[in-house]
Amino acid sequence: MTIDPRIATAINGENGEAEKAGTRSCLMNRRSFLLSGGIATTVVMVGIPGLVQSQTPAVVATYPRKFITKLSSLEVDEPFDFEYPDEGLYAESILVKLGKEAGGGLGPDKDVVAFNYTCTHQGGPLQGTYQAADKALGPCPLHLTTFDLTRHGIFISGQAYQSLPQVLLELEGDDIYAVGMFGLIYGRFDNLQG
């Protein structure tokens, strides 16, 4: 097999000096590679002293604070429907007093929770699917996903791979307010731009 003379020249140099010197096998050994890689990583991670650092401000989402209902008006296992964070597409939500302590629960028994009503798999409607015996929402009419409301809306079974977005709640006296979302609402790239 013959090597193209242009490739041989690129490897060995114009007059074959690399081949004569015995240095053509590799231009960098393992130790040099690791040392230069470590230096490059340090420069990227730590920065160069005296170099002006670019600062990117954090983007903070400001959710509206919305009155939902009174804690004293809730009955165990009787869902209360509302819309949050706006009245746009996929904003329908459920507030329910579970009668059992739940993740993110509000009230003296930590059993009042709220979740978005839209399945995270393909946007199936979950209205009317609350199961009091299991403290679950579902199954979704599209692909039968069911969500556990006592464990931050984690899916129990079905096709979804994300938990239901949980509405963050605040209690002020007897008044329950929605103040934010934990998780992305299906069909939105931003919860506040429906």
Image: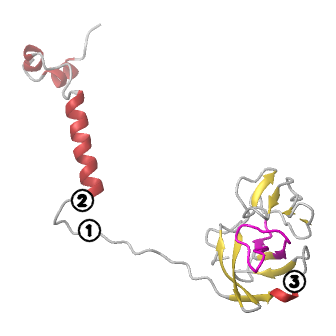
Closer to the N terminus: mark 3 or mark 2? 2
Residue type at the position of mark 2: Gly
- Quarter the N terminus occupies: top left
Q: Residue 46 is drawn in which quadrant?
A: bottom left
Q: Disc 1 on helix, strand or loop?
A: loop
**In the rendered structure, does residue 112 fall within the stretch colored magenta?**
yes
> Counting other residues with Cα less than 10 Å from the Cα at mark 1, is it few (<14), some (14-19), or many (20 or more)?
few
**In the rendered structure, does residue 147 fall within the stretch colored magenta?**
no
Q: Main secondary structure of the magenta part?
A: loop
Q: Residue 118 is drawn in which quadrant?
A: bottom right
Evaluate if marks 3 and 2 touch, with contact meaning CB atoms under 8 Å apart: no
Residue at 73%, 92% (x, y): give it: 173
Residue type at the position of mark 3: Leu
- 173 or 144, nearer to the observer: 173
Segment tinted magenta in the rendering? 95-118
Q: Which residue is mark 1?
A: 53
Q: Which residue is mark 3?
A: 74
Q: Which residue is mark 2?
A: 47
Residue type at the position of mark 1: Gln
- In the rendered structure, the answer to whether residue 162 lies left or right of residue 9 reads right
